[in-house]
Image (cartoon, rainbow, N blue to C red):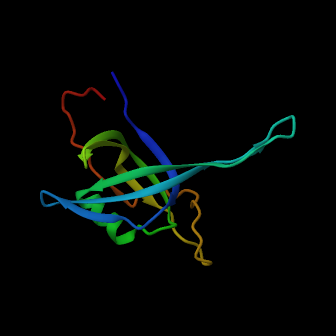
């Protein structure tokens, strides 16, 4: 048995880029997550550490992301981690991406700032995964 699941809560780095592959809509964007800095017992300051995550959404979920997701938005993403490679100018390039299955956009308050809304459990969109009848779970 194996599990491939990512859970990300962070800010969108740029508006989604839309493309079509074999008449299937795809959006790509990045999300930043930050581990907060701290002070060690000896007084040494450890700075914040930001990681950038490449997010990909397909089909209906891509439509929703294209319409509603913008740079700076606070998003919760559930998805699968994937790796791919391609050749360009004689060099092989590699990328790790999270293929979104659930996207939740946090609402903005009256000041235009986004914050997690307590008890708001409804995702913006959930990509229904095909069910395997042989799967006992």
Vertically, is 90 above or below 111? Answer: above
Which residue appears at 28% of the width and 65% of the height?
18
The quarter of the image holding the C terminus is top left
Vertically, is 41 above or below 120? Answer: above
Which residue appears at 81% of the width and 37% of the height?
40
Toward the left, the furthest residue is 22
Q: Position of residue 36 (x, y in %)?
A: 68, 48
Which residue appears at 35% of the width and 25% of the height?
2
Toward the top, the furthest residue is 1
Q: Quadrant of residue 14?
A: bottom left
Q: Position of residue 65 (x, y in %)?
A: 35, 64
Vertically, is 136 above or below 36? Answer: above
Vertically, is 109 above or below 100? Answer: below
Toward the right, the furthest residue is 42
Q: Is residue 37 left or right of residue 83?
A: right
**For this rendering, which residue is in front, 100 or 27?**
27
The quarter of the image holding the N terminus is top left
Q: Quadrant of residue 41?
A: top right
Q: Is residue 68 visible?
A: yes
Which residue appears at 33% of the width and 40% of the height?
82
Q: Is residue 121 visible?
A: no
């Amino acid at each position: 048995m194996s599990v491939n699941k990512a859970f990300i809560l962070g800010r969108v780095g740029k508006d989604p880029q839309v493309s079509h592959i074999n008449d299937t809509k795809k959006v790509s964007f990045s999300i930043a997550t930050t581990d907060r800095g701290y002070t060690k017992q000896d007084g040494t300051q450890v700075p914040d550490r930001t990681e950038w995550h490449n997010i990909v959404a397909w089909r209906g979920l891509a439509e929703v992301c294209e319409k509603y997701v913008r740079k700076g938005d606070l998003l919760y993403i559930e998805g699968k981690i994937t790796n791919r490679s391609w050749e360009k100018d004689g060099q092989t390039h590699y990328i790790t991406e999270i293929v979104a299955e659930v996207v939740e956009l946090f609402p903005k308050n009256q000041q235009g700032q986004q914050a997690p809304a307590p008890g708001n459990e409804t995702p913006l969109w959930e990509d229904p995964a095909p069910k395997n009848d042989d799967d006992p779970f």
